[in-house]
Amino acid sequence: MTENGASMTATLDDTAAGGTAGAARAPARRVRWWRLLLRDRVATAAAAVLLMVVLATTLGRVLIGDLATRQNLDATNTPPFHLEHGWEFVLGSDVLGRSVLARLIVAGGTTLSVAVPAVLISLVVGGAWGMWAGYHRGWRENVSMRIADIILSFPSLLLAVVVLYIFSPSAVNIVAVLAIARIPVYLRTARAESAELRGRLFVDAARTFGTRSGAVIVRHVAPVVAPTLLTVATVDFCFVMLAESSLSFLGIGIQPPDVSWGLMVAQGRTYLQTAWWTAVLPGLAIVVTTVSATLLAAWFRLATDPAQRWRLALPRSRRGGRSAALPEVPQ
């Protein structure tokens, strides 16, 4: 009895110690992502830029009030870094004396309010649809793939131009057409991943125990497919933002009095020789944001892939072919 009691006590102590160690490892596992990010200076800078853009376009709109629409005819075409008319003209003004800084903040919020919902809608719909089709296979997969092929047969930007030319070019219509045009990207990716996972041992075990197909997809397939879909979404965010800017530049995107980065470039191109900053600065904002998102997507792809994560511990010059780890996003 004494020996059995001692062994049971030792077992309980080991279990408690293991639970304590597991609890101690859980925070470390969460902190490790930040450590991986901080090891990569380029990815850290990209994340900082994106965070600044998000904060500026959300909190900045509250702070600037109506500066984006307020006209000051005494400060028309003020060059950047001239503060004689106030701090709001640190990035210059346009031909109507409106602050370029305030308009950049408001325009960034408009651009993100179109790109983010479009990406989220296409991600959720296309990802769920693709996992459903890839898991069940058969006619569901065939029909889904044919629908995706039909949508992808039209270039996304051309499809958006045609649809917005027929209907009114509002923000809701832009989000809807861009989301529908990008659904096949996530559908095909999720279908390929889930079709491969369908034959894995842990999925077979779940089916053997009588788990319903919906529960298998949610509990076992979705967590494995999600990192790849999020990486595709990060890359696709750049394309959607550029598509919105292109549509606004062509005059069938965001319409005045609203403003977006693409619309600012379109309105400022007439004054490139006299007020170049009205077109160059919003174009620079588009470039910096898209490049930052692309760099962060490359880091995220490596960080979520156990077979490639070790590369993040190497110097950037020795990693080689970092961009090759990114999935291709059809245009």
Image (spheres, rainbow, N blue to C red):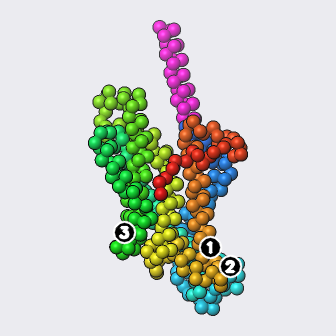
Give me the C-alpha separation between circle 3 and circle 1: 30 Å
Amino acid at dot 1? Leu
State the image coordinates of residue 141 (x, y, percent, origin top left).
Answer: 32, 43
Q: Is residue 12 magenta?
A: yes
For label 2, the SS is: loop
Tell me which residue sits at (44%, 58%) in the image. Answer: 119
Amino acid at dot 2? Pro
Circle 3 or circle 2, nearest the eye: 3
Q: 10 Å neighbourhood of mark 2: few (<14), some, or many (≥20)?
A: some
Q: Which residue is mark 3?
A: 163
Tell me which residue sits at (39%, 38%) in the image. Answer: 195
Q: Is residue 294 magenta?
A: no
State the image coordinates of residue 61 (x, y, percent, origin top left).
Answer: 53, 72
Is there CB contact under 8 Å for labels 3 and 2?
A: no
Tell me which residue sits at (56%, 75%) in the image. Answer: 265
| Sequence order check, earlier mark of 2 and 1 | 2
Amino acid at dot 3? Val
Q: Which residue is mark 2?
A: 80
Q: Which residues are magenta?
A: 1-25
Is there CB contact under 8 Å for labels 3 and 1?
A: no
State the image coordinates of residue 197 (x, y, percent, origin top left).
Answer: 41, 35
Quick check: can you spot residue 16? yes
Q: Which residue is mark 1?
A: 281
| Sequence order check, earlier mark of 3 and 1 | 3
Is there CB contact under 8 Å for labels 2 and 1?
A: yes
Q: Residue furthest bottom?
A: 74
